[in-house]
Amino acid sequence: MVIIRGAGLAGLAAAARLARLGHEVTLATGGTPLGDAYAPGVPTNPDPLGTITLPAAWRDLFKKSGGHLTTELNRAHLTLVEADPVAVDLGEGDLLRLPAERGAQFRAIGERLGEAEAARWRDLIDSLDDAWIVFRRHALEGTTPVTTPGQRAALLLDVSAGDLADRVHPALGRLVVDAAGTPGAPGVEALPLAVERTFGRWRLVAADGTARPGTSLVGLLTTRLAERGVQLADEPPGPVDIDCVPAGPVGRAHDAAAWLARTPIAGADGRLRASAASPAGTQPWAELGSAALAVYALHERLTGEDCRPTNVDFRLPRLPQG
């Protein structure tokens, strides 16, 4: 039996993946709602998934846990559609509607603020794109630690969000600081802007076109756990295999040291951890990615089998019929 501790998004994702890989899974919830902060109807934040970025992370999770996201959404009479452009306040109620796509962003900014400002914004997000490629290697596709000055520079760890914001129009600079959390946060924390431009911004709508909360995805995921036979318990019935309760501060890093101090997936003690305190960070897609890394490592420990996407020979076990 595999035991996962923590009812957050990472815990649900890890449980669903491991169950689909053929493991008997117990998820120790600590008595909290499944999905924790992302659970439907949590009063402190009724729709933290109102805008969905990097939907590929959700698609991969549902595919690797025994079904397709589109199929599950269809059953729930839901559709994933593009979200409205971001409204950027240029002052005195004058709004710039900023779409997600690169060329559309350039045109929208160019029409309102001039092509020079559009080029500065494009170049800034291009630099974040470059950092995203390196970030994926360190935090989403593997667990390689950041150890060299070159790696720090590539991740924009020694450039503050405020410095990045100063490169563009003040109204657009506020988007950079908002994405990173504070002006002093490392530039890597502004990566969601690059993610949104590359993968878009999405929302859920019902069959009649009305908006539905993004937290509905968590409801679909909890249904998947039941379908895969995941057992729930308040407390772990034995040694924990993947700990999805944050072992460190949760939130955007206020400086480079805080970013580097995030809890690694595989600790020196050998325990696997995946949560919003992992190197990938606090975004929903980050929790899903952290959970996947922990699952790959645990499955290999238990079976000797490499189930990572890079292993083209790996096949999921057949689901029982009926």
Image (cartoon, rainbow, N blue to C red):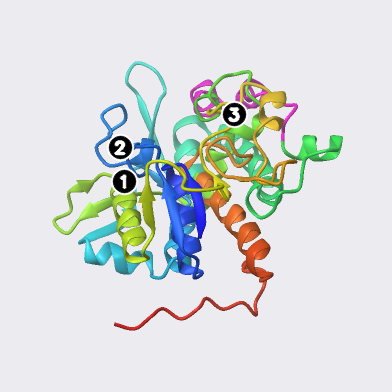
Q: Residue at x 30, y 58 (%)?
A: 223
In this picture, residue 147 sits left or right of residue 245: right
Secondary structure beneath label 3: loop
Q: Amino acid at mark 3?
A: Gly
Q: Indicate whether 26 appears above or below 305.
A: above
**Magenta residues, as a range?**
156-176
Residue receiving disc 1:
214
For marks 3 and 2, give the CA distance. 24 Å
Q: Secondary structure at mark 1?
A: loop
Mark 2 residue element: loop
Q: Earlier in the sequence, mark 3 or mark 1?
A: 1
Q: Residues within 10 Å of mark 1 (few under 14, many from 20)?
A: many
Which of pointers 1 and 2 lies earlier in the amino acid sequence? Answer: 2
Residue underneath mark 2: 47
Q: Are marks 1 and 2 in contact (CB under 8 Å)?
A: yes
Check if mark 3's residue and mark 2's residue have beta carbons within 8 Å: no
**Does the magenta segment cover residue 14?**
no
The residue where tag 3 is placed is 248
Query: How far apart, in angstroms, are the residues tagged by discs 1 and 2?
Result: 6 Å
Mark whose residue sits in front, 3 or 2: 3
**Amino acid on which disc 1 is placed:** Gly
Labelled disc at residue 222: none
Comparing 242 with 204, the one in front is: 242
